[in-house]
Image: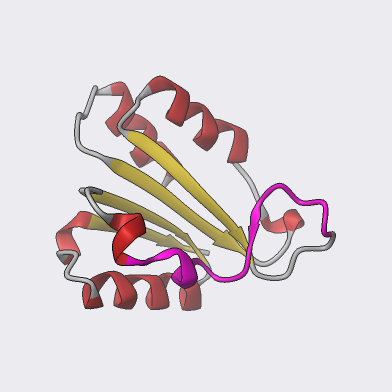
Amino acid sequence: MYFQARSSVERGDRSKQIFVYGVRTEQDQFYLDQIAHLSNLSPEFSSCFYLSRPNSTSSSTNTGHVTAWITPENIAGIEEFYLCGSPAMVKDARARLEELGVPKECVKFEQF
């Protein structure tokens, strides 16, 4: 999913995009710096990282479940979503986005 998002940013895609990434622990994270760097390359691109079971309280990543972040206020104006995480997280996030009226074709995802 990272490479797809990077390609979109490098092409100069002007749609508002967000990379939503949820994993259990810090050890499950990868590409964080690269994903964050995409936000620096394009004002249209942002990212949201979540840990459901952080190993420490000092983590700079949001804790809890991605679905708690998916609210009408948080997704307003976003045209493209990149979801990356466990099959359960992706399934729940896709369902929540659909409940809020986001078209399926605007949601790209990868499960691992």
**Above or below, 3 relative to 37:** below
Please give left or right for residue 45 compared with residue 33 in the image.
left
Residue drawn at (25%, 39%) of the image: 16
Q: Which residue is painted at 55% across and 71% down in the image? A: 65
Q: Name the spot of residue 31 as percent of width and height, x first.
A: 59, 40
Q: Is residue 87 above or below residue 83?
A: below
Given residues 94 and 59, the one toward you in this image is 59
- Classify residue 33 as left or right of residue 73: right
Q: Is residue 2 left or right of residue 86?
A: left
Q: Which of these two is toward me, 77 or 65?
A: 77
Q: Which residues are magenta?
A: 57-71
Q: Is residue 39 above or below residue 105?
A: above
Decide whether residue 63 is among the magenta residues: yes
Residue 71 position in % (x across, y down): 35, 67
Front-most of residues 30 and 58: 58
Q: Position of residue 108 (x, y in %)?
A: 29, 56
Pick the front one: 75 or 5: 75
| Magenta run includes residue 30 | no
Q: How are the residues colored? A: secondary structure
Q: Is residue 110 left or right of residue 51?
A: left
Report the number of numbered marks: 0
Pick out the residue farthest to the front. Answer: 73
Dominant secondary structure of the residues highlighted in magenta in the image: loop
Q: Residue at x 55, y 61 (%)?
A: 22
Q: From the viewer's perspective, is residue 108 above or below residue 71? A: above
Expressed as whole percent of the image width and height from the top left, the position of residue 78 reads 25, 48
